[in-house]
Each structure stands twice: as C-alpha cells, then as structure tokens.
Image: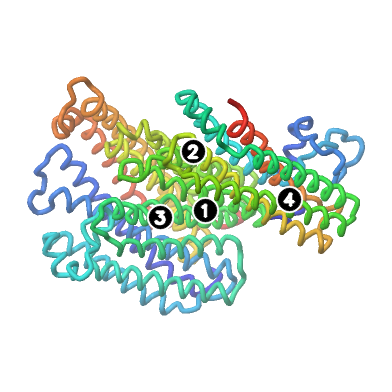
Amino acid sequence: MQYKSQAVAMPYFIAAIAMFVGQIVFGLVMGLQYVIGDFLFPAIPFNVARMVHTNLLIVWLLFGFMGAAYYMVPEETETELWSPKLALALFWIFLAAGVLTILGYLFVPYATLAEMTGNDLLATMGREFLEQPLPTKLGIVVVALAFLFNITMTMLKGRKTAISMVLLLGLWGLAIFFLFSFVNPHNLVRDKFYWWWVVHLWVEGVWELILGALLAFVLIKVTGVDREVIEKWLYVIITMTLVSGIIGTGHHYYWIGAPEYWQWWGGVFSALEPIPFFAMTVFAFNMVNRRRREHPNKAAVLWALGTGVMAFLGAGVWGFLHTLAPVNFYTHGTQITAAHGHMSFYGAYVMVVLCLISYAMPILRGRAANSNKAQVVEMWSFWLMTIGMVFITLFLTAAGILQVWLQRVSDTPMSFMAAQDQVSLFYWMREGAGLMFFIGLVVYVISFFIKGEPRTVSN
Amino acid sequence: MLRDTTCPESRLVALRFPRLMGMNTRSLASPLPARHPVTEYRLAGDLAIWFFILAELLAFGVFFAAYAFTRANHIELFNAEQHALHRGAGAINTALLLTASYFVVRAVQAAERSAAAISARWLLGAIACGGGFVVVKLIEYSAAFEEGVSLSSSPFHMFYLSLTFFHFMHVILGMVILAALWQGARKGRYHPGDMNGIETGAAYWHMVDLVWLILFPLVYVIH
C-alpha cells in the first residue's frame, strides 16, 4: 500500500461482500417463491424479498464504488486522502442507515414504514428500486456529498489523471441523478421520466464511467501498459457510452406515454449501446495481451477480463435482444428483462467491484498478491459464479421466450399466472443455477481466509 | 489524446494492412529504413479516432437504414414533404462543408511543410465555413418550425429533424475540434515529426463532411 489513507477502503470492501452474501440469500428465497408461492410467507413475502434483493445489490455496489474510490484516488493523485476520518465516519453512518433500512423492510409492513418515516411529508417511496424511506434517501445524499467532497478535495491537492477525472465524473453523476428520486409527481408519465433518470442514467450512463475508470486502473496496474494508451481508449469508450447511453434512455419511453419518435431515437441509440461494451472487452484483452509485466495477482487479471466479456454479453447482447420497439412490444416486463438485468449487473458492476477488491485487498493486507492456493480458490469462485450466472440468464431467457409466446403471441393467450405455471420448470433450473452461484460466493469468501506463501513480483 | 505522438497501434495496423492504410503517403511522419518498404504506408491520425469514426458512421448508417424502410412505406408523403424542404439552403451548406474540408486539407499540408501560421489560417477558414453552416441551418430550422414542422408532425419530419439535428451537433463538435487544432497550430505543435494531432482532428472533420454528403441527397434530393 503506497498511501496510509488507502486503508479506509478495507471496511467498505468487507461490508460490500457481506451485503453481497445477503443479497444472494434473498435471491435464493425469491427464486424459490417463484415456484413455491407461500415459501416463508407471511414472514418474508415475495415483494419484501425482492426489495431486499435489489436494494442490497445497489447498496453493496455503492459500498464497493466508494471503497474503490478511496483506494484508487490516493494512488492516482499521489497524495493522501483529504480526510480518512471523514471516510471512516461516513462508512459507519452509511452502514447503519443501510442496515436499519433493510431491517425496516423485513420487520415493519411497508405502509407502516412509510408512515413512520415521513413519506406523507414528501412522498418518495413505493417505486421499484427507489423504495428507500425518506431518511435513508436523505442519508444517501448526505453520505454521497460528503464522500464526493472528500474525494474532490483530495484530487484538487494532487495529480489529476484522466482515470480519476472519469471516476469523479461518474461519482458526481451518480449523486446528482439520485436527486431525481425525490421528484415524484402525480402524473405517472412524468413520474416515469424522473424514475428512469435515476435508474437508467445510473446503470447505462454514469456507472459505466465508474466501471471504465476502475477497469482502466486495474489494467494499468496489472499490465504495465502505458497510462497514455489506456487513458486514450478510456476516453473513446466513455464518449461512446455517454452518447449511446444518454439518448438510449429513450428505450424506456416507448410505452410510458412519451411521443412516438422516442421509439426511433430510443431504438437507434440503444442499439448502439453494445459498442462501448464491446470496445471495453477488446480493450481489456488487448491490454492484457500487450502486458509488459507478469503481475503476481492472476485472479485480478481474470476478473478484469471476465468483467469485459460478461458486461458485453449481459448489458450489450442481452440488452440489444429486447431493446428495439417492435420486439419490446412483446417482451416488455417479461423474464427476458430479468435475464438481462441479472447478467448485466453481474457482468458490469459486480465483477468490476470484485476485480478491484481482488487487486486491492491483498495489498491492503500487506502483500502484492495472495498465495497461489488462495488465488486458485478465488478463480474457482470466479468460474462457479460466472457459469452459475450464465445459466441463470439462459434459463430466465428460456422462461421469458415461453412466457411471451404463451401470454402475448399465441392465438389463445394465457393469463399471467397461468403462463407462470407453464414455465415453472425453467424457474426450478434457475434456482439450481442460483445455488451454484451461491456456492461460488461462499468459495469466494473462503478464499480470503486461505493462508500460504504470498506470491511476489519475482514469481 | 490529440498530443499522443507515439502511436504503436498505427504502426501495427500499417504493418498488417499496408495497402489499406496507404491513404496519406505524403505525410510520412516516422520513416523506417528503406529496406522495409511496407512501412511507407501508415494510418493517418490516431487509431482511436478511426474506431470512433466507424462507430459514428454506424450510428448514422442505422438511422439511414431506418429512414429507407420508413420511406418505403410512405413514399407519397415523403415525396411531398421532401419537396417542401429548402433545397437551396442544403446546397449552400454542402458547398460550405466541402470548402471547409478543402481548407482542412490545406491546413494539414501546411503543417507538413512546418508552415504553422499558414496552417492556422486555413483552419480558421474552415471554422468560419462551419460557422456558416450553423447559421444557414438555424435559419432553415426556424423557417421549418414556423411552418409547423416538429418531431411529431409526420414520419418524414421526424427523420428530417432527427438526422439533420444529429449531424448539426456533429458539426458543432467538429468545430470545437478544429478550434483546438487552430490553437495547436498557432503554437506550432504540428510539424513533420508530429502530425498525429492535426491528422486525427482532420479525419473527424472529414467524417462530418462525408455524412452530410450522404444525408443531403438522401433527405433533400432523391425522390
């Protein structure tokens, strides 16, 4: 570790992994509820399990991004963090807010939670992914702003690199777009616009900048390729990302009451969204092929390559699959969407955070890389989780195609629930794949506890 | 990015596809020994900009294809509304963009002769032509809006506004790039040993021009 203050990243990474485990547990619960409807009812109804599953994902990724920023920025700016104490205080505040929110979801009926937390003062609750009570939302804003203040002050006093600028742009965008979660007009069309400005402009906009910056950082470290070259490609990729991603928001406007031209704008530009993802894959492989050093941390290199491929498949290919309006007319809100959501989140964001953790954690623990044994176990977890996710995606896609056919295309269309019954075989198989993913995650956690002689640069 | 002088990718591409890359043999920046004649050919500008240009062309290409398919379903409507467009304004803009491209070529050639001041003057001329394009386009738009043309007024109008506005934004970006080149040229940054920056920017500008050369006949002229 080059800078002492980088150590604040560690608690963020640990909390992120712990919440990741929680997220997957609730994913398994939900997966089972798809086929055994009253499983754990009334203790944990489906809607609560779903809320916990998605909210934990978002929160742990935010922990991961923040930890990554605290680790990367001192090294990029070549200076200590402006205030490590603030970073640590924010960690505890964010953790407390996150845990309280999840406990609130689990132990208080949602309507009561809304009453208790002042939703009547400013109604922001009840929308998918943005279910957080008002105090939590305000907490997220305060934590994000204080975090950004800390990072920005650090950058102002140190070296300014393209990677840290892209990261900062992404993080500021993340905070700014979240503000739309406070806008909740009665007009449903307008409501949907603001909602997408958080959800879409996060995952298909500013988060991609964070992804690009994290990936570029790790690639510089593990390959030793010139910063100049890596940063140049980062610029090209983020420009394509922003152009296609921002106008591509239009693919959410097809059926919400927006003018018809959005079907063209949304279709054309979101059809181009796979390009930056593909570029990122080529970029990652190209840089690794042109490496000038053999970094002892093979696991981090594997995650870096993996995130390129899986982000392209999950976000790029599976996104394209149903992004054109004539297709989306049939597939909207089916399991095709769920398939895309799973693989894209895993490929783009889960994997890049795990990549950064994989690279940084050994260094934070005082070694260049983990022992060979620990790395082998970590790579096993990579394959178990990744293959598990591929199968989750394939089974959900199959379920989705069948659902579209039975429910929307056939001459005698079925009702939603009747169609769900027909695709249950795929849900069972998805649950199996989910179990495989969970085993991979357990193996991942175990890999942190495996001792052995650390690998050094000379190896 | 524009100042990147070492471009290993360019050399790599040049070695793999010597003929493909022989688009500007005059601006030979880093000649290798004569026993390697294949390296006479090299990629003008940075490889990254060519990827970017390809992505841009793909975006326009998809839009053009969508236009073609929609036109096939509404031929009479498209014909009538195409007639109502201000073809004269389009023709003036075509002349302006072609002139700008010619000026950019002269600027690159001047930089190859290390004539920085002349190069900067040509670039300024190109920026002025770009500015002329913007003014003509704005006049055309305001006339169209007065006639009630909007994104929702008809399928043709949707494509007319979308395609021309998307291109319009590219002209503005191209002008920003030309302005950066102008600054660089005034500081004498481009010379036979370092042409990467100006060639990269010039390539982008030519793409903007090229797209218009397809867009103009497609939307304004061909019935």
In screen coordinates, is B157 left or right of B134?
Answer: left
Give the alpha-carbon distance from disc 1 to disc 2, as whole Å. Answer: 37 Å
Q: State the count of labels.
A: 4
Mark 4 or 3: the one toward you: 4
Badge 1 crowding class, 10 Å Cα cut-off, few under 14, some 14 to 19, many 20 or more, is many
Mark 4 or 1: the one toward you: 4
Find disc 2 in the rendering and name its residue. B157
Find disc 4 in the rendering and name its residue. B129
- Circle 2 sits in a helix, a strand or a loop, which is it? helix
Find disc 1 in the rendering and name its residue. A212
Give the residue type that dot 3 points to: Trp
Give the chain letter at badge 2.
B
Marks 1/2 same chain: no
Find disc 3 in the rendering and name its residue. A202
* Whether residue A83 is situated above or below residue A349 in the rendered picture: below
Label disc, if present, on residue A401 of the rendered structure: none
Badge 3 crowding class, 10 Å Cα cut-off, few under 14, some 14 to 19, many 20 or more, is many
Give the residue type that dot 1 points to: Gly
The front one of A360 and A401 is A401
Give the residue type that dot 4 points to: Cys
Q: Earlier in the sequence, mark 4 or mark 2?
A: 4
Quadrant hosting residue B120: bottom right
Badge 4 crowding class, 10 Å Cα cut-off, few under 14, some 14 to 19, many 20 or more, is many
The reply to whether dot 2 and dot 3 touch (C-beta < 8 Å) is no
* Whether residue A406 is situated above or below residue A255 in the rendered picture: above
The front one of A302 and B97 is B97
Where residue B80 appears, as percent x and y from the top left, is 52, 29
The reply to whether dot 1 and dot 2 touch (C-beta < 8 Å) is no
Marks 3/1 same chain: yes
Quadrant hosting residue A384: top left
- Circle 3 sits in a helix, a strand or a loop, which is it? helix
